[in-house]
Amino acid sequence: MRCDGCTGMLHATLACNFGRLTDVPAKTPSDRTTRHVDDEFRRHLSAALPRAARIDLTSRAAYSSDASIYRQMPAAVLEPRDAEEVVAATDIARELGVPVTARGGGTSVAGNAVSPGLVIDFSRHMNAIQHLAPDTRSAVVEPGVILDDLRVAASAHGLTFGPDPSTHSRCTLGGMIGNNACGSHSVAWGTTADNVQALRMLLPDGRRLDARRGTSGDPGVDAELLRLRDANLATVRTELGRFSRQVSGYGLAHLLPERGFDVAKALVGTESTCGVVLSATVQLVETPAARVLLVLGFDDVHQAADCAPLLAKAGALTVEGMDAALVAALRTRPGRSEAGAELPSGQAWLYCEVGGATADEATDAAKALAESVPGATAQVITDVAGMRGLWRIREEGAGIVTRLADGGEAWPGWEDSAVPPENFGAYLRELRALMDDHGRRGVSYGHFGEGCLHLRTDWDLSSRRGLDDYRAFVESAAILVARHGGSISGEHGDGRARSELLSRMYSTEAVAAFSAFKGVFDPENLFNPGVIVDPEPLDANVRPGPGHDRLDLTPVHALHQDGGSFASAVHRCVGVGKCRQTSAGAMCPSYKVTRDEVQSTRGRARALSEMLRGESIPDGWRSTEVRDALDLCLSCKACRNDCPVNVDMATYKAEFLHHHYRRRLRPAAHYSMGWLPLWSRIAARIPRLVNAITTRPAPAALLKSLGGIDPHRDMIRFAEQSFETWFARRPRQPGQAATAGDPNSTVVLWPDTFTNYLAPEVGKAAVEVLEALGYRVELPTGSVCCGLTWHSTGQLSVAQRMLRRSLGSLDAQLAAGYRVVGLEPSCTVMLRDEATELAGAAARLSAQTVTFAELIAEHGENTDDWPFRELDVAAVVQIHCHQEATTGSAADRTVLQRLGVRTDVIGSGCCGLAGNFGFEKGHWDVSQACAELELYPKVRASAPEDLVLADGFSCRAQLAQGTHRSGRHLAEVLRDALR
């Protein structure tokens, strides 16, 4: 409960102790923060709200940007657990003149959630669906509710929330209300404003409004709004609310008498400039029983734009457009060369979702819709997986096209302009001509059925001249869109990117009305100043910005995809926030279990970016803030695959750790776990003695303490005989079909540290299987190591030496054309992927390395070539995160299917142990929580006779300690299946 007495005492104390602050004009909070006098605010905020306030530099750096081109370091971040904490924080901010900005999922592209003051993040705690009423088709939600969570809850009743932006897996209802988000289905179900019934809002002065149709909940506010409306009736009726995607400025049209004086809808899209949403009542819509996807192909994007409005009028639930450049950009991503293969022929496409009472009815309707567009190619997709795959291309567009097909960068800026749908084709042609005049390139996609265009453009944001060019273009584009009767924003709000341009779109009277509207709620300009009213310059506080990267460095990794530039690699992250989704996908494990922005891939990228700038984080590679941000990164590499722009935080972490600890004492775990290959080689000489020591409680506890190993962890046990020793001593196998020197039938089995010293039974099983398939099996001619453990702990110089030495041992075998077969997925990925980044001579090793499953999958199912019986068994399968993120698991699934294994593949990503991560002191809770997302529950629920498959040693170690089930390697399963 809020205590007004305590609040009053706090205000009195502040006035007494910080009298100099009272000289700062209350109406200019931005001046207050720009003079860097925020220490008092942070001190009082953390004292009053110790659980909710985050004032450390690491946290603030993570919130320094959203998905836009703008950057400002906040004074503090608040993660409130209830409305009372929001009230208390805004009271302190008002007393000290610190601006306040609400933030949802941080996916806004216009700089709506960037602030130098207090940023309130509702997503971590205030994320409850307070009430869902199927009978009235409504729900009451807190502002931090993720859209997909609401949609899942509503789907149990055949309902959904209509607006669905492409960030639906991580955007919040509060953020959608702030920006008046729309999405692909708004052509059928309207904008967020159309679907909001009531809002409970906190005003800057501490009052709370319960706004709805007919009233704000405050008679004084109602009277002011009525006076404002009546004084501007002609302006509001002629300039506002002209078409569905006109969301720029304030929604004053909802105050008109013919629209019922709906204050709640008028407050949607105000971008937290008028108040902070504490809860909302939203309406839900009934979904069709069946849906199919019609994809239409056109010769160019302009034809698609011309056709789109007709399809919208014909009743399609979505009319989404994209051009071939988006697909081309996607095909440059690792592992996605075949992306878009399911699309019908063309250079541009429209996605038209069609509903019906049955699948047949929906299919017939889609075919009829296709016949109405005779000049287009068409394909109707009815299966869920096929539709999901195609939607992924469109929904990830914002991230995909930040890297053009030739590797060039593209940025938001002129991001989501909209015009009346009938003008869309003409507008798009003229906009393309304007881009040509300015020498700009970009990729077009968006909500074509409603005349809304998304566009990422290759601005040069790193120089003053580039920013001048950016300003010149968007000012011309604003005039162009106004000439077509359009809106500079069609769904993402105005933010810092477009607020300055409102005067190009609206009359002086309309802009004055906006100012008066804000004055009703926030006369002191405390909430999100610089947005919509009294705007910040659109080229201020831009990232990267001129002279943005002050840290000059040469990375150890080659970073081929980024031209050898660590800064370019870090700037891959544009903030779309897919790493924040928790309902699906492998990224980002530590964020999923902590819900902490710092522990998201995006949060870590922001900390690295601040380090490169050298302003807020001036210590460069020695930064403890960045070290802390990276600490809970599992280096699982899921972001390498799942992130639309392929951010590879595992590589960035290894690079940072290398420089951070260079010529310095490292954490103990870097010596114990990082040097595991060396310790294993030594232990292999006396394995019984080592195991006898490490299994006794007192010595084990001492070793864990000295080695920086978490006390909860079981110590590993060394095999009494290494795989290499077994292989050297085993009897020669008679009757092998393969002969030495034949590159097609001789393979080199890679004796990784884990297989060699800890799990030789896997290597033995692999040899037996490979020989049964007719292969002649060799080991490398000398001692080898991929350097994985040194790489993951940032000891890159040692990793390079290990790789180069291994290349020497393999030289003759690689020259003979032998393939190298990996059994440990992380080591195999090291050979195929990181090796080329660390050692220039590793290209041939990378090209000739295959996974065990890939080699097996090459063999057919006939009796002679497939010596395995059918198993007819169920299995829980944990695919190693490094493998899934790089080469994928298609071969593994193929082999298991041929064996008759019914698989339940873990979809949540990393097992949580992640090599050295789960062993390091302080990581136990996060490690176990990652496993509890899906792996542990599914294994516990499996039958005793079911298999548990995990090729990764660390995955099997996690399983053994967390579930007491023994995970098995594919090689062992195949060995048991030999006829």
Image: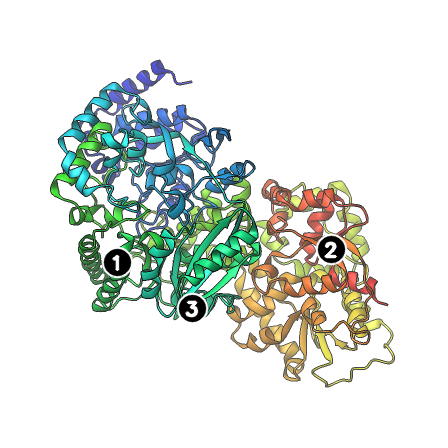
Q: Answer few, some or many: residues within 10 Å of disc 3's Cα (few below 14, many 20 plus, some between 14 and 19).
A: some
Quarter of the image for residue 205 reads top left
Mark 3 or 1, nearer chain start = 3
- Position of the C terminus, as image quadrant, is bottom right
Can you identify the residue that label 1 sits on? 546
Asked if 286 appears above or below 477 in the picture, the reply is above
Name the mark nearer the viewer: 1 or 2.
2
| Colouring style | rainbow
CA separation in Å, label 1 and label 2 = 56 Å
Q: Amino acid at mark 1?
A: Pro
Q: Which residue is mark 2?
A: 902
Query: Which residue bears the numbered disc 3?
Result: 328
The one nearer the camera, 322 or 372, is 372
In-image side of 148 versus 109 (left or right): right
Q: Nearer the viewer, mark 3 or mark 1?
A: 3
Tell which residue pokes out farthest to the top in this image. 5
* Of residues 719 and 62, the one drawn nearer to the viewer in this rendering: 62
Q: Quadrant of residue 679?
A: bottom right
* Mark 3–mark 2 distance (CA, rounded to whole Å): 36 Å
Looking at the rendered structure, the kind of residue marked 3 is Ala
Specify the amino acid type for callout 2. Answer: Arg
